[in-house]
Amino acid sequence: MRLLPCLAGFALAAASLAGHAADTLAASSYARDPNQPVDQAYTAQIGKFTTDPAFNSPLTDYLPASPTVPTPLKVLGHIAGAADWLPYSADVYHYFRALEAASPRVKVFSIGRTEEGREMIAVAVADESLLANLKANDARLAQLADPRTIGMDDGKADALIGQATPVYYLTGTIHSTETGAPTALMELAYRLAVDEAPYIRNIRSHVITLITPIVEVDGRDRMVDLYNWHKAHPDQDFPRLLYWGHYVAHDNNRDAMGMTLALTRNVADTYIGWHAQVLHDLHESVPFLYDNTVGDGPYNAWIDPILTGEWQQLGWDNVQKMTRLGMPGVFTHGDFDTWSPGYLMFIAAMHNGISRLYETFGNDGADTRKRVLDPSDYRRTWYRPNPPLPEVTWSQRDNNNYEQTGVLIALDYFAHNGQTFLKNFYLKAKRSIQKPDEAGPAAYVLSADEKRSGTQARLLRVMERQHVEISRAGAPFSVTLPASDDQKKPQTRRFPAGSYVIRMDQPYSRVADALLDRQYWSPKDPQQHPYDDTGWSMGDLFDVEVVRVTDPDVLKVPMTKLDRPVEVPSGLAGVDVPAARLPRVALMHTWLDTQTEGWWRMALDELGVRYDYISTQDVSRMGDLRSRYDAILFAPIGGASLRQIVDGLPMWGKPQPWQTTALTPNLGRIDSTPDIRPGLGGAGLASLKRFVHEGGLLITAEDTARFAIEAGLAPGVFVTPTAKLKVVGSVLQADFVDHDSPMAQGYGDHLALYSAEGQSFTVSNLLTGDHHLPNAKDTERPTGRGGPHDADVPEGRPFAAPPALPDVKPWQAMPLNVDQAWNNPWVIPQQLRPRVILRFADAKRLLVSGLLDGGGEMAERAAVVDARYGKGHVLLFAGNPIWRGETMGSYPLVLNALTHFDRLDGKR
């Protein structure tokens, strides 16, 4: 009974020691300037909106006062992290420009526009002298970024490092529902400009802090609209944010490979143009601060090992110091693998810098509310010894405190170790240039006689957007290629003049190597839950030959570096589809999710394909679709079922509008509805069936292909059941089965396809499927005379040899004998049977890039099927042919179907 008081005393002592440790760290490393006054009104509101003192630190529990530089409260009427308020992008920019006008330590730059024309900015904060000499500093950083300019001379590099100031680039709110970063970064910029604490002065004089407060500006303004609607209707459920950017939502943070989005290109051009050392992206999803800079394995195979050490340094320093300050729930490592180079932050990792990312705890808005954590979030682990609390009352100010404290600690560490990081920046660039002599290869070559010249140009454009140098050979040349599985001996390959050479002796060789090489994720890797796609080999996905050359003599070939962008043909020629009459096209979306179809919208817009953008709700009202359209594209939704597509969201409660109003001026611009909840409905499904039955073309993929099958729109087609198959965003080999189909126009015998989860199809001549039909593969001989391969011969009569059982390939339908077909209502008429266009390769050839386990369950199964329904066609893709701007090799499958919508039967 005396144990409890003892434990209580121990707890009090521990708390006292923890508080003493926090005070000691704050006093020694992060002490305020005692002579600088504090903005008492602002500081009081920091305390008011912080729900627990443990959720703040001595770095952010006050705001220094300035007689000349305005705070967010003075300019916008609210402090950073105030409850019940989110600023629009215009408010955020207004504040930063007010800061610039008041302080010589702040400078605002416009870095580009979004797809909808909104401005993106970058804000530099540093000592006035550093900002006045940005051009000279950038010239020094540029030489470190490209050691060829100083003859790869370490001595010259050291001299530059002694004179240069590093650039630390912070970005916020690429994900529009993660709302806290803009206010945190506004207040951070004020602190960096105004605070005279010694550690802040040291940051200001040793680091140029560059800030893009809002990456996804279009989505930010829509999110503020949605939040304002929520505050005006406090007792109602409100719609989820359906459209973030103009095209995609969460996937905007997977675009650093394809560089298709304006936001990605603007951030990349800024990061590379400033020759920055760090790109640190602020996110919100994990309590309370997850510094996934360190992450989990497997690490990307193309990064410089120096980078992994930098991740460890910065990540663990952040965790240790925030823990010493008494802030619970700060950790690193976690289960985020750093394999894919598709994340925005990875622009830095692929361009000789340091990629960093925080996940803090956001509330999807500025409400202060009780949060009940999942046990997995508060469970103590070896990498999270100080886990978050199981239940908290959490505010946006709490989130801002964690974001700012983490960033300030990181900037302080970076300021003290800036020369080390600059030296690493130089060394990573130098080692990238030395790649041909070290890990290799020497170059990648794209032949001038490539048959798919339009798609080749698009792939080269991706390289250009990555700031990769491209050269063209001035004369024909030959290289020696090493032995391979197909060629047992080294081979000589001849390339014509004009072939493109991507040399690996350049500063950004790693990003070219990472995107053009192939990837392999072992099924036995300790990390069994990849975070994103595991394969992305772009030459394969673009259906363009890319030759990896290890022969160093390729670098001696006379060549000229391109001094202007590669010209990409306009229209359909950009993906090597002949100009043709296009049908009347509609792209149909649901109100369940609008992200994945956004990649399709982008592709159609870029290629000049005109279309009506309609919803499943529109289809339910339209009635006669065939009089309006020849083809309807129903792009993937993302794991949606037939029931969800038809029924939509639950109809209890009040309507959830997505419309343009005075309260929500940014909603309803792409599409609108008075209520997002209704789905396709029975009437819409009937209308869609009638559209196809009367001769229309419906194109589906992934979950919408499953929808079509389950809805009865694809007679004789079934999703192949699997038990042990594992595919996670991989590149798989497929073979053309039917070259007579117009869809195969322009293709050879093989095509690499993207597969998210390994879906494939089985076809049958029966509506009920082929199961229970006898076949040569599954039928075993009965007990009887002879060996296992002999026929059993009954006694007392002449032997009657049975007819041979069908021995069909996995992608083929089982032929029916006369008895099976006789008077059978389930037999599909010959002219209405499904037609397999592409099938997956055999198990040995199936994997091109990524992760594949249990591939035999999908090997040789159908990958693309043209099903018949009445007079029309339903095109079924097992995977997604239009994905993240990375799969342009399969775009023509869709486009060929559109341009031949009324001639798809071909030589059937």
Image: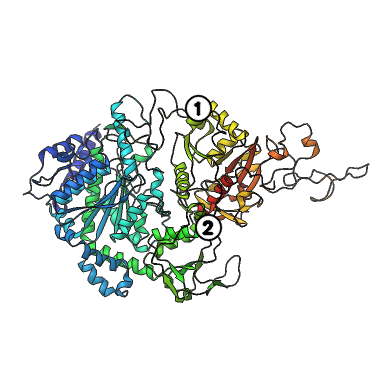
Q: Give the image location of residue 163, x and y in percent.
A: 20, 67
Relative placement, left or right, of 56 versus 119 is: left
> Quadrant location of residue 78?
top left
Q: Give the image location of residue 43, x and y in percent.
A: 14, 39
Viewer-nearest of discs 2 and 1: 1
Q: Is residue 887 above or below residue 590?
A: below
Tell me the quarter of the image containing the N terminus.
Answer: top left
Q: Give the image location of residue 724, x and y in percent.
A: 57, 45
What is the crowding at mark 2: few (fewer than 14 residues within 10 Å), some, or many (at least 20)? Answer: many
Relative placement, left or right, of 882 versus 792 is: left
Relative placement, left or right, of 361 versus 883 is: left
Which residue is labeled 2 in the image? 540
Q: Secondary structure at mark 1?
A: helix
User: 612 or 431, which lies in front?
Assistant: 612
Type of the residue with mark 2: Asp
User: Does the rendering let one see residue 522?
Assistant: no
Residue at the image point whose x is 34% and y is 25% from the top: 236
Colour scheme of the rendered structure: rainbow
Which residue is labeled 1 in the image? 621
Q: Secondary structure at mark 2?
A: helix
Is tag 2's residue or tag 1's residue first in the polypeptide sequence? Answer: 2
Relative placement, left or right, of 485 versus 228 is: right
Type of the residue with mark 1: Arg
User: Does the rendering let one see residue 432?
Assistant: yes
